[in-house]
């Protein structure tokens, strides 16, 4: 049953990698969620991925992202006019209104950011075309000439063709107002004071585990007690409050400075 489940999950990973022209061997597998680290090494071996990265708190990675994510508000105004006839004062007013509304919304948030970052962009196209190119703007004080130049540059960068005889059209004006949150110290997600001095002190027990058609005596470690400089040879099991990580025979694991476990996948 476990083997069939892993094959099914590996197929889903192939759908977002191989089918899009990406070679899985060029990537590491990021194992998060309560069950992610349980299957990660088997999936990596199935797909030929060389490494697995298990964050310090796999089971609460999504929740942690919500806690530390920047506060962002996006605004868009449809203009849909040829650049040559645009009112520059109106353009500036729209972008400044976006900024003011975004800063006001962030000011009402319960969490205060370290700083506020504002970025502007324009969705543009040549008149008569259907596809749109997003063009970053240097500031809200944008002019018709600047819009034309930036669009032509972006269009050439994407399509390697110039169309000077066709007028440019401004479709939308966009603004993102981001309240930048302070960075957190990832190394403290697992209490440094709780780490053992040696790998042996972090071991809970040895139990038989079925790998590759036979039983292996497998050490079980407390993830929270692992020394940061520990090297763990598979087979091994790392248990913690929110997840269980499995190392198969031939795998080799180590920690980085942030407390992530990096697993080098051994030969199948």
Image (cartoon, rainbow, N blue to C red):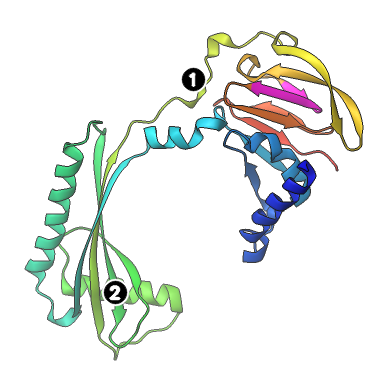
The image quarter in which residue 135 lies: bottom left
Numbered tag placed on residue 46 in the rendering: none
The residue under the point 29% across, 89% down is 166
The residue under the point 77% across, 48% down is 4
Q: Nearer the viewer, residue 210 or 148?
A: 210
Would residue 48 be visible to someone looking at this image?
no
Question: Quarter holding the N terminus?
Answer: top right
Write down the residue under mark 2.
124
The residue under the point 42% across, 83% down is 161
Is 102 drawn above or below residue 244 in the view shown? below
Q: Residues within 10 Å of mark 2 (few under 14, many from 20)?
A: many
Residue 248, position as x, y percentages in the image = 80, 33
Q: Would you say the magenta stretch is mainly helix, strand or loop?
A: strand
Mark closer to the chain start, 1 or 2: 2
Write down the residue under mark 1.
188
Q: Is residue 60 left or right of residue 199?
A: left
Residue 69, position as x, y percentages in the image = 37, 38
Q: Secondary structure at mark 2?
A: strand
Residue 134, position as x, y percentages in the image = 33, 67
Q: Residues within 10 Å of mark 1 (few under 14, many from 20)?
A: few
Q: Is residue 238 magenta?
A: yes
Is 126 drawn above or below residue 97 in the view shown? below
Would residue 225 be visible to someone looking at this image?
yes
The image quarter in which residue 12 lies: bottom right
Question: Quarter holding the C terminus?
Answer: top right
The residue under the point 64% across, 20% down is 223
Residue span colored magenta: 231-239
| Numbered-mark total | 2
Q: Is residue 243 magenta?
A: no
Residue 137, position as x, y percentages in the image = 26, 62
Q: Is residue 227 left or right of residue 174?
A: right
């Amino acid at each position: 049953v476990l083997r069939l489940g892993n094959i099914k999950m590996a197929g889903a990973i192939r759908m977002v990698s191989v089918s899009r022209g990406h070679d899985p061997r060029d990537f590491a597998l990021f194992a998060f969620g309560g069950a992610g680290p349980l299957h990660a090494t088997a999936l990596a071996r199935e797909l030929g991925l060389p490494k697995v990265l298990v964050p310090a708190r796999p089971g609460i990675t999504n929740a942690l992202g919500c806690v530390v994510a920047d506060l962002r508000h996006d605004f868009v105004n449809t203009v849909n006019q040829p650049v040559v006839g645009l009112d520059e004062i109106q353009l500036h007013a729209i972008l400044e209104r976006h900024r003011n509304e975004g800063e006001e919304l962030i000011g009402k948030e319960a969490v205060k950011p370290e700083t506020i970052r504002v970025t502007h962009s324009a969705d543009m196209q040549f008149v008569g075309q259907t596809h749109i190119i997003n063009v970053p703007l240097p500031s809200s004080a944008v002019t018709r000439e600047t819009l034309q130049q930036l669009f032509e540059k972006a269009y050439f960068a994407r399509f390697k063709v110039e169309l000077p005889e066709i007028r440019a059209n401004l479709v939308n004006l966009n603004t993102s107002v981001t309240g930048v949150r302070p960075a957190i110290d990832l190394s403290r997600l697992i209490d440094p004071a709780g780490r053992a001095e040696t790998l042996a002190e972090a071991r809970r027990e040895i139990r038989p585990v079925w790998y590759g058609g036979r039983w292996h005596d497998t050490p079980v470690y407390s993830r929270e007690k692992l020394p940061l400089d520990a090297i763990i040879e598979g087979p091994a099991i790392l248990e913690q409050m929110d997840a269980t990580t499995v190392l198969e025979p031939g795998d080799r694991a180590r920690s980085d400075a942030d407390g992530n476990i990096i697993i080098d996948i051994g030969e199948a």
